[in-house]
Amino acid sequence: MRVAPTSRLFFFCVLAAFVLVLPTMLRAQSGASAPASPDLAAAMAQYRRALAAYNEAYAAYAAVAGDYWNAIAEKRHSRAAKRANTEQLSINDYVLEQPPVYTGPPKPRDPSRPKEAEPRAHVPVVADFLAAAEREFKFVPRLPRSESDFKCAYAEVALAAGLTRDQIVRIYGFEATGNGDYDVQAGLEFNKDARAITTALGYNQLLATNTVEILAESGNRFIAGLSQKAAQLSDDRKAAMAGKIAILRRMVAFARSVPDDWNRHEVLANTGKGLGLHALNLDLDVGPLLQTQKLLESVVFARRKGSRETLTAAELEMMNLTGDGNGLDMIMLPPAWRDKVPTANFFQPSGYRHNPVAQRNNVVASLIAATDAQMDKEITKPGAKELAGALR
C-alpha cells in the first residue's frame, strides 16, 4: 500500500512518540516506579534513622515491660497457691512498683506511603441483633411499651435474685451513664448516630460473648423460670410464651454446642446466630434475667471463695471490670494495703493498656474511690432515680 507524504510524516511522528513512551509503559506494567525525587529520598533517609532509633528504644522498653508483667503473673499464681493452702498473704505477694512507661521517640510514619485513615471494623448494633434473631431463629423480642416497663421488670428480677438496692442502682449508674435505656450500647450512650465501640448492651453492658456464656451456663434455669411464669398467664399470652420458650431452647442448645470456655463462646458470639442470641437482652421476659445474672455470678463467685461481707457496688464493679478472679483478689486486699498496691496487679497487660481509668488511678484505693465518685454522680440522673423508684 502506498502512503501519502503527509500520512507518512504523521506515521513517523506517531512511531517516534511511541518509542519515547514505551519504557515508561513497560515500567508501569512491571510494577517498577520512577526514581524517587530528591525530597522523597531525603525524607526516606530521615525516616530510616528515626525508625532505627524507635526500634532500639522500644526494644529496650519491651524487655523491661515483659519482665514486669511476667512478675505480675508469677505473683498472681503464687497468691492463688497460697490461698488454696490457706496460707497467710503478705503485701510482698504483690508487685509494688508501677508498670514501666514507654518514653522513647514515637514510631515514625513511612513518607513513601500515603496517609490513609485506619479502617475500622463494623461493630454490630441493635438493628443487627434484631435482624439476626429473626433470620436465624425466627425470634422477635417482646419489647417494653416504655422504659419504665423494663426498669420495673429488671428491678423485680434483680431484687428476687438477692442483689441489693445499692448494687442495682449504682452499677446501673456506672455502666449505663445513669440515664441509659434498656437498649443502650457502648459508644452510643449520648449520640445514637455515633459509632458503637463494642457489643456491650443494656443496663449492665453485656457483651455478645457474655450473653452466649450466660445462656450456656444458666439458660436451662431461665427456661424453667419462664415455664413457671407461663402457667400463670392467660391463654393467648401462654401460647406466645410457649413459642418463646421453644426458641430459647434452640438458642441455649447453640450456646452449649461448644465447651464452656470464654474463647469458644466468643467465636460463637461473632456468628449470625450469636448476634441473634444477643437480641434476648431486649426482650421484656429474658432481658432482665440476663442483665441480672451477669452481676449475680460475681456475687456467687465471691461467696464461694469465702467472702462473707456484702460487696459494695464499687467492689462488685471491680469484679465486672477485671473478671471475677482478679476482681475478688483486688477487693480482698486489707484496707491498709489498698493505697500501696498498684492496680496493674489485677489486669492482663492488654487490658491495662486499654484502661486509662486504671492507669490514672494506679493504686487500688484510688480506683475504687474514683468508681464510687462516678457512681455518686450518675445516680443523681433521671434514669437512675427512676430505677431506684422501681426498687421500692
Image (tube, helix red, strand yellow):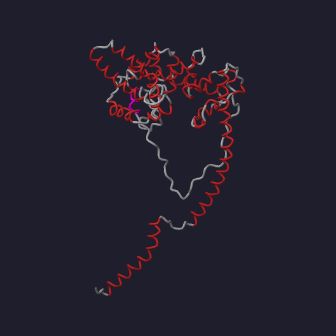
Q: 385 or 242: nearer the eye? A: 242
Q: 355 or 216: nearer the eye? A: 216
Left or right: where does residue 128 sit relative to residue 207? left
Residue 353, percent from left and from top: 59, 37
Residue 151 occupies which quadrant of the picture? top left
Left or right: where does residue 50 sit relative to residue 293? right
Q: 51 or 166: nearer the eye? A: 51
Location of the N terminus by quadrant is: bottom left
Residues drawn in magenta: 274-281
Q: 115 or 301: nearer the eye? A: 301
Check if residue 280 falls in the magenta segment: yes
Left or right: where does residue 6 sit relative to residue 120? left
Any part of residue 189 in sight? no
Check if residue 268 falls in the magenta segment: no
Residue 162, percent from left and from top: 50, 14
Q: Residue at x 47, y 15 (%)?
A: 161
Query: On screen, 94 above or below 38?
Result: above
Residue 339 occupies which quadrant of the picture? top right
